[in-house]
Image (cartoon, grey):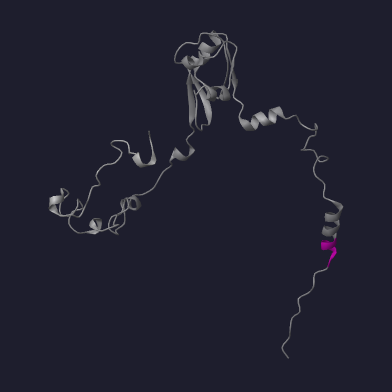
Amino acid sequence: MMRLHNFRRRPGSRHRVKRLGCGESSGHGKTSGKGHKGQKARSGGSIRLGFEGGQMPLIRRLPKRGFNNAAFHKNYAIVNLDDLNEFKAGTVVSEQLLRESKLVRGHFVGIKILGDGELRHGLTVEADKVSAAAREKIEKAGGTIIPRLRDDRRVQSESAPVDNVDLTSEDAREKPSPIKASKAKAAKSKPRAKKRTSRES
């Protein structure tokens, strides 16, 4: 029976601690594997990456010219036709369905369908980009391709407009309140005080 006084750790969970600074006979050398003196031999002494002893580092000496597109790179989730065969015929393959099926994951700008494999039945595929081969195979199987609705466009399409009002017309523009108009009129009609100039006698 297991009791508090006879608990034992699992075999292999503990091992002998590597003891340093115990001389040459300890098996780790006289200087404990840190070499002789210097900044890196001290306790807590470390040199950051790219440090060159105080001189101008290489990353600052090199010129920075040109344009780098890395900040504007768009990441697309890739889905092949072979992956779409797991859905039944007539299914609308949306981003939510692809995420639930673990075919796409993470953050991406859009979904791109590639033509690797053959599609066995017709599907309605929501995607941002489709290769020419994939489009041909989807249409040949009796499927269709529709543009993917992102969250902002989906909300706009689902919410019906309140009034059919042309906001660009002058009548639909917001008119200033009478209080604001009276304040503005009073500010214009108020004469400006003249600056007093002191003459030396």
Residue 193 or residue 108, whichever sits in front: 108
Q: Quadrant of the N terminus?
A: top left
Left or right of 47? Residue 104 is right
17 relative to 7 in the view: left or right: left
Query: Which residue is farthest bottom?
Result: 201
Q: Residue at x 78, y 35 (%)?
A: 166
Q: Residue furthest left?
A: 25
174, above or below 197, in the image: above
Tell me residue 190's x, y (percent). 84, 66
Instruction: Where is residue 189? Give x, y as percent.
Output: 85, 63
Which range of residues does the magenta coloring cover?
186-190
Count of marks overlaid on the render:
0
Residue plotted at (70% across, 27% down): 158
| Nearer-the-camera pick, 15 or 166 | 15
Q: Quadrant of residue 124?
A: top right
Q: Main secondary structure of the magenta part?
A: helix
The quadrant of the image that shows the C terminus is: bottom right
Question: Among all residues in the image, which is located at the extreme front?
Answer: 1
The spot of residue 80 in percent (x, y) is 47, 18
The answer to if 11 sits in the magenta stretch is: no
Say which residue appears at 38% left-offset and 35% top-offset.
2
Q: Viewer-proximal residue, 10 or 99?
A: 10
Relative to 132, say whether 191 is above or below. below
Q: Nearer the viewer, residue 137 or 150?
A: 150
Q: Which residue sits at x=80%, y=44%?
A: 174
Picture quarter containing residue 38?
A: bottom left
Give residue 20's position: percent from left, percent from top: 21, 52
